[in-house]
Image: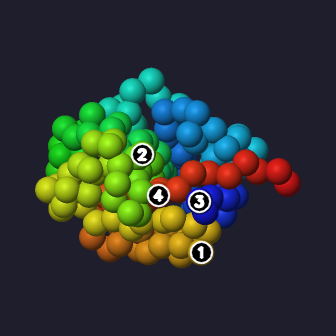
Amino acid sequence: MTKINPKSIVTKLVGNQVTHYITLPDSETRYMYDVLTSSPTIELIPVSREGEAIPIAAGLHISGKKPVIAIQNSGLFESGDALRGLGLGIGLPLVMIIGYRGYNRKGDTPDTSAHFLEPFLHTWRVNYFLIESNTDSDRIDLAFETAFKTNQPVGILIGSEYEENNS
């Protein structure tokens, strides 16, 4: 399985002037979290429930900041009302980094979170880009361009695991 280097993601976030990274830390994203703790330009904001992430991002956006949220697909489901009311309702140009838990490009996964993610995003009419390796990192720039052109939330689906940063 190809893994994603978290430094390549952070480099893109810094290049897009992200100020805050709102997340529910978990074991699957620990390497990303480790890299972000040493970022001098992006402030980490941990939450206790994914449903808090979009409202916090909305408040930061209104105050002139440029946040992103990072949550798992099941956490996005829990955030549905915030996505509807704040993300789509006020026209929030928010990039959402969504862990595609259970994703398998062959489609043979018993994890229903993977089965429902893309239909969920289609239902809400949320554009998204899939990242499966470091070579897909240019899609992060596309996500930011799309979010700010449409004033709507855009997803970046992380379809692989983060690799440990050994450098």
- Say if mark 3 contacts mark 2, CB within 8 Å: no
Q: Which mark is residue 135?
A: 1
Q: Compute the Cα span from label 1 to label 3.
A: 14 Å
Q: Residue 8's spot in the image, x, y percent?
A: 66, 64
Q: Marks 3/2: CA distance?
A: 14 Å
The residue positioned 38% from the left and 63% from the top of the image is: 106
Cα separation, mark 1 vs mark 4, equals 13 Å
Please give the name of the residue rendered at 38% of the width and 33% of the height, measured from the top-left corner. Answer: 50
Please rate how many residues cluster around mark 1, counting C-alpha atoms within 10 Å: few if below 14, some from 14 to 19, many from 20.
Answer: few
Between the residue at mark 2 and the residue at mark 1, the CA separation in whole angstroms equals: 20 Å
Residue assigned mark 3 = 1
In depth, the one of 61 and 1 nearer the eye is 1
Q: Tell whether 41 sits left or right of 80.
A: right
Horizontal arrangement in the rendering, residue 65 relative to residue 44 (left or right): left
Nearer the N terminus, badge 2 or badge 1?
Answer: 2
Q: Does dot 2 land on a helix, a strand or a loop?
A: loop
Q: Amino acid at mark 2?
A: Arg
Name the residue carrying label 2.
101
Label 3: how many residues lie within 10 Å, few (<14), some (14-19) or many (20+)?
Answer: few
**Which badge, 4 or 2, comes first in the chain's sequence?**
2
Any part of residue 14 in sight? no
Disc on the earlier residue, 1 or 3: 3
Q: Nearer the viewer, mark 2 or mark 1?
A: 2
Report the label total.
4
Q: Which mark is residue 159?
A: 4
Q: x, y (%) of residue 151? A: 28, 64
Callout 3: helix, strand or loop? loop
Q: Nearer the viewer, residue 141 or 78?
A: 78
Q: Which of the two labelled residues, at mark 3 and mark 4, occupies the earlier sequence position?
A: 3
